[in-house]
Image: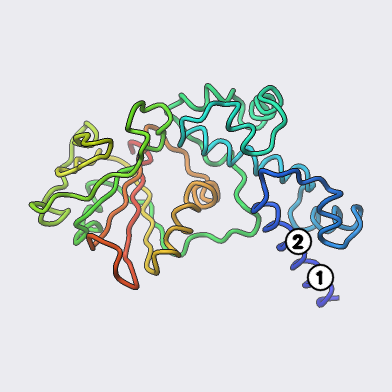
Amino acid sequence: MDVIMSYQHSIVVELVNLIDMNIQHDLSIEKLSDLSGYSKWHLQRMFQRYTGMKIATYIRNRRLSKSAVMLKQSDLKVLEVATAIGFSSQQAFSRAFQRFFGESPKDFRTSQEWDFSKHLPPFLIQNPSAYHFIEMPKNIYLLKGYKFFLYHSMNASSSGGEERQKYGSRTGKNTDTLMRTVKLASSGWEVTLSKGYYETRNLTLIRGQYLLFEFNGRLNEYLVFFDSIYDAYLPLLGVRIRNGFLIELHKEKNFQYAEINVKVLIYIGKS
C-alpha cells in the first residue's frame, strides 16, 4: 500500500509541475489524462486526494495568482495579461479574477495593498530555509556589510515611465558600507532616476516591519529563488503588504563569484 501511495504521490507531483510549466496553454483534463496515461476519473481522484481540490480549480487559481503578479509588476494591458495566462477573453478573465480576489483587475492593479494570502502557491512548495520578520531600526545590524543594492517597486505597473524597468544600478564608488548610508525617516527611499534606472547613494528606510530573505548559492539558483518570492514564498507565508517595496542587498559588486550572498528585504508596513 505504501508503495502504491508513494507512486501516486509522485504522479501528482509530476502533474503539478507539468501544469505550472504550461500554465498559459490549454490544459484540459483530457490532455492531462493522455500525457499521464491515467483515465480522467482516476487522475482527478488522485489529484484531489493530495491537493484537496479539483484539477480545473488548481489550474484556474494558479493562473489567477500568476496574473496578479503580472498586473502589479508589468504595464501589460488587462487583455494581454488574460491572454498570456490562457484565458479566452478579457471578460472571462475579469469575472474569474473578481470571484477569486474580491476586486477587479483594474482595482487590484492600482491598490497600494497586496494580500498574498489570497494567492495559491504551487502545490508542495517548501518554506524558504532562511527568512525572518524583523523591525527597523531595531534589527538594522542585520544589514551590516552589504554594500550594493537594487531597488524594486512592488507596484511597478502604476509607477509610470521608466520606473517600470524595476532594476536599479548599484551604488557609487563613494559608498562605504550600507551601514554608513542607511538613515531612518518617515519618508521613503532617497533615489535619483538616471537613464531609466535607480541610482541610490543614500538609503532611507521607513520605520516598520520587514521580511528578510537570505540566499547563499549560485547565480542561476538565485534567479529561480527570486522568481519564487512573488509566486510561491510570499503566498505561502500569507504576507499582507501595503505601500511595499523590495531591495536586493549584495556584498559584491558583480556576479563573477561561484557563490553569491544576497539578502532580500521587503517592506511590509508600519508596526
Instruction: Indicate the secondary structure of the residue bearing disc 2.
Output: helix
Mark 1 vs mark 2: in front: 2
Report the side of 103 relative to 268 (left or right).
right
Please state which amino acid type lies under the numbered disc 1. Met
- Looking at the picture, tell me which residue is in the foreground, 63 or 4: 63
Q: Position of residue 259 (x, y in %)?
A: 34, 71
Report the side of 69 relative to 63 (left or right).
left
Residue at the (37%, 34%) spot, across then down: 164
Query: Residue under circle 1?
Result: 5
Q: Position of residue 248 (x, y in %)?
A: 32, 52
Query: Residue under circle 2?
Result: 12
Q: Position of residue 63 (x, y in %)?
A: 65, 41
Mark 2 burial class by Cα count in 10 Å: few <14, some 14-19, many 20+: many
In the rendered image, the quadrant that contains the N terminus is: bottom right
Q: Earlier in the sequence, mark 1 or mark 2?
A: 1
Residue at the (34%, 27%) spot, across then down: 161
Q: Taking 28 as reference, is 103 above or below it?
A: above
Residue at the (86%, 49%) spot, across then down: 30
